[in-house]
Amino acid sequence: MNYQQIELGNGKRRVILEGDFDAVALSDGELRPWLESLAEEASGDIYLDLSGVSFLDSSGIGAMVFLFKRLKARNLALEIVQPLGQPRQLLEMLRIHEAIPVQLVA
């Protein structure tokens, strides 16, 4: 999985994920520690761009919920942006939008 962040100003960041957001991506390499440090160091809201994510599983959902809760505890927000295909279907099926704002593409 590839990931990067873009500073938007006022501490806000757009985090762009590409590839499979699953147990393998979270257990291999640096993604999990990077998300944990992002949750701790963020000074503004986070926009999690999933437009490049081709597959999402329960581990990816768990990572998003972790990030959401950590940010919320610090009075910051998480918004999921542009999930497509299978990730969008899973988010809709689990009704994630009822807890975490999801910005959908028409």
Image (cartoon, grey):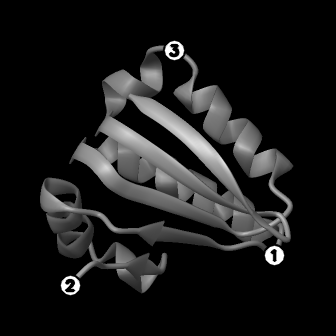
Residue type at numbered disc 3: Gly
* Callout 1: SS: loop
Judging by the rendered image, the residue that carries numbered circle 3 is 29
- Residue drawn where x is 48% and y is 76% of the image: 100
Q: Is residue 81 left or right of residue 78?
A: left
The answer to which of marks 1 and 3 sits earlier in the sequence is 3
- The CA distance from mark 1 to mark 2 is 29 Å
Q: Nearer the viewer, mark 3 or mark 2?
A: 2
Q: Position of residue 1 (x, y in %)?
A: 38, 28
Q: Going from the N terminus, do you reach mark 1 or mark 2 first? A: 1
How far is disc 3 from disc 2 in space, using C-alphas? 34 Å
Answer with mark 3 or mark 2, whichever residue precedes in sequence: 3
The residue positioned 49% from the left and 49% from the top of the image is 16
Residue at screen point 44% across, 20% down: 27
Q: What residue sits right under mark 2 in the picture?
A: 106
Mark whose residue sits in front, 1 or 3: 3
Residue 8 or 64: which is nearer the viewer? 8
Q: Nearer the viewer, mark 1 or mark 2?
A: 2
Q: Position of residue 6 (x, y in %)?
A: 65, 52
Q: Using the numbered discs, state the Cα–Cα distance from disc 1 to disc 3 in whole angstroms.
A: 29 Å
Residue 89 coordinates in the image, percent (x, y): 15, 66
What residue is shown with label 1? Answer: 75
Q: Mark 3 touching mark 2, by CB under 8 A?
A: no
Residue 72, quarter of the rendered image: bottom right
Inspect the image, locate mark 1, and give the three-letter code of the amino acid beneath it: Asn
> Is 57 positioned to the left or the right of 21 in the image?
left
Amino acid type, residue under disc 2 in the picture: Ala
Asked whether residue 99 appears in the rendered view, the answer is yes
Helix, strand or loop status at disc 3? loop
User: Can you say whether 38 is above or below 79 in the image?
Assistant: above
Which quadrant is home to the C terminus?
bottom left
Give neighbour class at mark 1: few <14, some 14-19, many 20+ (Cα, 10 Å): few
